[in-house]
Image (cartoon, rainbow, N blue to C red):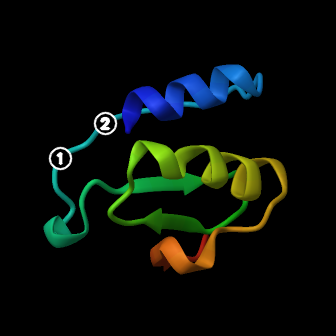
Amino acid sequence: VMHAVLEELAKNDIEANVTTVGCIGMCAQEPLLDITQAGGARITYGKVRPDMVPRIITEHLLQGEPVQEWVVGKTESF
């Protein structure tokens, strides 16, 4: 999934800070993908497969619309 994210970001010329972390307590939903944009909510996608990444990048990052059916968590910004 990480490789798919990095490839898709490069393909779309998107500059992003990508990091890996340990378990956040949602192990049954792994692999997880969090997206946080400046001033926006933290959106967590669950059970992410590499083939899901292009849609997440296109709809969420490029079009500003999270892929709701794959969202497993949301934390509002403060």
Q: Residues at badges 1 and 2 in contact (C-beta under 8 Å)? A: no
Q: In screen coordinates, is 24 left or right of 61? A: left
Specify few, some or many for label 2: CA neighbours under 10 Å numbering under 14, 14-19, or 20 or more.
few
Measuring 55% from the left and 54% from the top, which residue is drawn there? 35
Measuring 31% from the left and 36% from the top, which residue is drawn there? 20
| Residue under pointer 1 | 22
| Residue under pointer 2 | 20
**Quarter of the view holding residue 72:** bottom left
Query: Percent x, y for residue 70?
Result: 49, 72
Measuring 25% from the left and 69% from the top, which residue is drawn there? 29
Amino acid at circle 1: Gly
Query: Percent x, y for residue 62?
Result: 81, 48
How many numbered dots are placed on residues in this image? 2
Residue found at the far front of this picture: 51
Q: In screen coordinates, is 4 left or right of 31? A: right
Query: Percent x, y for residue 4?
Result: 47, 32
Q: Measured along the vertical axis of the image, is residue 19 above or below residue 25? A: above
Residue found at the far right of this picture: 63
Specify few, some or many for label 1: CA neighbours under 10 Å numbering under 14, 14-19, or 20 or more.
few
Q: In screen coordinates, is 64 left or right of 70? A: right
Measuring 17% from the left and 47% from the top, which residue is drawn there? 22
